[in-house]
Image: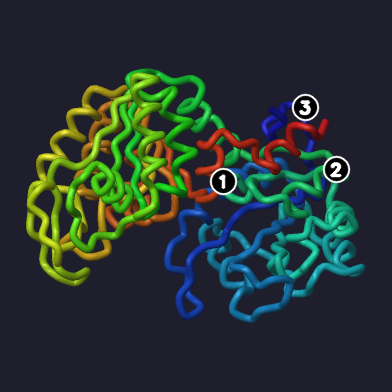
Amino acid sequence: MKNILNKNLDLKGKKVLLRVDINVPMKNGAITETSRIEKIIPTIKLLLEKKAKIIIMSHIGRPKGKVVEGMSLKPISEKLSILLNKEILFNKKLIDENTISEINKIPNGSVMMLENIRFHKEEETNDKEFSKKISSLGDIYVNDAFSCSHRSHASVEGITKHIPSYYGLQITEEINALKKITLEIEKPISLIIGGSKISTKIKIINNLIKKFNNIIIVGGMANTMLKHSGIRIGKSMCEHECGPLIKEIIENSKKYNCEIITPKDVIVSKSLDGEGKEKNINEINEDEMILDIGSKTISSIEEKINNSKTVLWNGPAGYFENPNFQNGTKKILEIISQKTMNDKIFSVAGGGETVAAINKFKKFDSFTFVSTAGGAFLEYLEGKTLPGIKALNQNV
């Protein structure tokens, strides 16, 4: 793996095009969560130590190739400047024939951020000429955006065909953590997987069944499992046409000797903003919906985690946005983080809602690794080859 820690890589005075993902949530122009910005700081600091000229490329949102005022990277450049305690030069113009001369003027050991790369329609179409154009802005390219590496975009995949390309520190750490989960497994290994739709995660489950000892299904996905095993789930969120998928999971779990665990008891309510009531799964009324897991289920999950060496978590246990239905997610977090802190397990968490829950309960530093990637994280777990990673490996 070619990364920027290569001892023979002299970067003094070199223009380094650094692709990162700082697509952070914003509300009324203010950044509401900064973990993606914080994750790129080690790579930037290393490049600064090496006296490189750093040119940051990133995006926010989906402007569809047009300039959208509310999707400027300027507020993010200002936040990064505060976190780094260093001036970030912000180039608000779109990339054109003058951009290279503006980059050439900046001194060694400085940072310039370019405007939202997705303001150029050629970015998402992976246009060959645009890839060549952005590659001409630098001497080397560094990808530190694992969360974008499932996209065949110009600044992720196309650019690597025209310029020496390397892995950044964050993307290297991410790949190593996921390799440890999928290839270098220390057993027993457990997967806790939630979310609303089992149909979107069937490939992940079937890929990991072959390697994992336990798969614990929670959230809306568990409702679907319960429904198709003959349990009445009232008006709970559920996919009604998933019989064949459930059958496939059960058959594969028997084939590969992987235990599938679903809730024994749940927290129900008649509405999302209602109060919770704990019930066994065979006691749910028609006007009730499942919104969290119950105490018996939490105890069974704790037992599995306590008997595991490795744990992967993707997806909350319930509707944790309402404090009445956050207990399951909070308890899973506490159990995993406690076990991790005591050096008992290797733990990896990832996915948008999972990271939101971890941040809500301030447990970001309690896991061995937290992936801020969404789609790329899930596609890697499915066993797919990510275009951005493949491109770096082919660039020599």
Q: Residues within 10 Å of mark 3 (few under 14, many from 20)?
A: few
Percent of width and height locating residue 127 = 84, 58
The residue lying at 71 percent from left, 78 percent from top is 67
User: Residue 129 vs residue 381: left or right?
Assistant: right
* Tag shown at residue 376: 1
**What element does badge 1 sit on?**
helix
* Tag shown at residue 181: none
Q: Earlier in the sequence, mark 3 or mark 1?
A: 3
Residue depth check, mark 2 versus mark 3: number of the one nearer the observer: 2
User: Residue 49 vs residue 108: left or right?
Assistant: left
Indicate the quadrant where residue 357 lies.
bottom left
Which residue position holds label 3? 8
The residue lying at 80 percent from left, 49 percent from top is 158
Distance from the alpha carbon under mark 2 to that under mark 1: 21 Å
Q: Amino acid at mark 2?
A: Lys
Percent of width and height locating residue 294 = 13, 47
**What element does badge 2 sit on?**
helix
**What element does badge 3 sit on?**
loop
Q: Residues within 10 Å of mark 2 (few under 14, many from 20)?
A: some
Q: Earlier in the sequence, mark 2 or mark 1?
A: 2
The residue lying at 44 percent from left, 30 percent from top is 208
